[in-house]
Image (cartoon, rainbow, N blue to C red):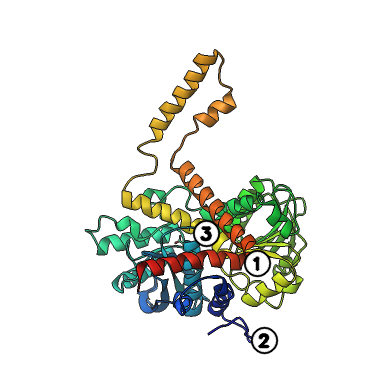
Amino acid sequence: MNLIDTPISQKLSFRQSVDAMVDRAAPYVSAPPGLIEEIKACDSVIKIQFPVRMDNSEYRVFTGWRATHSAHRQPVKGGIRYASAVDQDEVEALAALMTYKCALVNVPFGGSKGGLKIAPRQHSVNELERITRRFARELIQHGYLSPSGNVPAPDMGTGEREMAWIADTYRQMHPHDINYLGAVTGKPVSAGGIRGRTEATGRGVMYALREFFRHPEDVKQAGLNGTLAGKRIVIQGFGNVGYYAAKFLAEDDAIIIAVIERDGAIINHEGLDIDDLAAHFHATRSLKHYPGGAYQTDGAACLEMECDILIPAALENQITAENAHRIQAPLIVEAANGPVTFEADNLLREKGKLVLPDFFVNSGGVTVSYFEWIKNLQHMRFGRMQRRLDEYRAEGIVQALEEMTGKPVPQHLKQRITQDADELAMVRSGLDDTMRLAYQEISETFHRHPDIQDFRTAALVVSLNKIVDTHLQMGT
Ligand code: GLU
């Protein structure tokens, strides 16, 4: 079914909204009849209900889902979300976004996503561990979790701790699988994780924006000019993605003028001190009473503030047909998954706003997950073989230059030549390269097709072309 022409009064679900975006891109993709429908369809989804004993001995039944959207490449990949509002439609929509995300950034995985209906803050750590291990066991037993088939990662409400429990559960059930660490990514570094994964999504947002500002014609298209330095940014969401994006963008001299959270927003037109705000937020779990800015209870209203860049980094469904016409920012950078609905996307385009789409902007997480998975399969940290070799060579170059010229190499140049390529430096370089290349492909497609009006459609065309190619090469 083509959803593009659905009347605005008939609200699309998250899943339908993602599908409608694909429908809009489909005419620019050359594919045999029916193949785009095949790609859009969610391959399979499992709903699991399982009991867990609470600390007070009571039994509680939990409901979780894992959707495999497209297994055109394997393993399929995507996070596990813990939230009380999770449902099947959301998990399927997020799984679909993972398919388009992986294809866009050349991560050779299909798309998947999991969700557990739970309010994690209402449980003790012991309960959370029992619930997570039980959910993992169910997923493993039903064939929805393994290093070669389906590899989860953190998402909203989950993090390193949950991933370590999942990896350990998989290891217990498959004691002879030498690649057990590759069953899940986003693990603590001491438990087989990779340096730089925690902040990867936020860092990717910064790399995405840096690359955007290297394209003056695109910057102009958004009605902006210059570089990232001095741009006034509003960020919605101060969780893992929002915090790191804010921090790295501020380090690049952008000015974070507002941070919006569940319970309100904090505003400072001179620019917020992100680490100071984070310390307050972690201590009090609220932005309220932060002395470095003005507090406003109506957080959602701040999405409509005058600024250069708006970064929704919280939940889906934040910019809708209801508030889209009030958005003032000329550039909207989707760090969350699905923050702009299909209807709102159309309204923003009509108003000349430029939206950098979620499955590009937040792809840093899965990109570094891919590096982690490779590290797990190769059983060796990146750089272990060549790090010292590079160092000796670099020292040799410096020595040769000094002997030949009779002058010392200036310290700042020496530092660049002998820069240490440890695992973190490699992860950052791989992430930066990935974000740059993906942006270039999107921008090139946008400019090549005069009929394509927005970057989301251009990005979907890039992804769909790659997925179609894989299908055609593979046959059915
Ligand atoms: N949950 C993250 C996302 O939405 C990361 C997925 C992964 O690393 O597999 O992209």
Which residue is most to the top? Answer: 406
- Horizontal and vertical percent for residue 395? 46, 24
- Horizontal and vertical percent for residue 347? 71, 74
Front tag of 1 and 3: 1
Instruction: Inspect this view and state whether residue 298 appears.
Output: yes
Residue located at (43% from left, 29% from top): 391
Placement of 3 over or under 375, stated as above or below: below
Residue that label 3 marks: 363
Q: Is residue 224 left or right of residue 99?
A: right
Residue 454: image tag: 1
Amino acid type, label 1: Asp
In the figure, residue 168 lies in which quadrant?
A: bottom left
Q: Nearer the viewer, residue 85 or 12?
A: 12
In the figure, residue 330 lies in which quadrant?
A: bottom right
Distance between mark 2 and mark 3 Cα atoms: 32 Å
| Mark 1, secondary structure of its residue | loop
Residue 9: image tag: 2
- Horizontal and vertical percent for residue 253? 69, 46
| Mark 3, secondary structure of its residue | loop
Residue located at (51% from left, 74% from top): 93
- Horizontal and vertical percent for residue 378? 32, 49
State the count of labels. Answer: 3
Residue 241: image tag: none
Instruction: Inspect this view and state whether residue 191 appears.
Output: no
Amino acid type, label 2: Ser
Amino acid type, label 3: Ser
Query: Does the beta carbon at disc 3 come under 8 Å from ligand 1?
Result: yes
Placement of 296 over or under 191, stated as above or below: below
Which tag, 1 or 2, sits closer to the chain's start?
Answer: 2
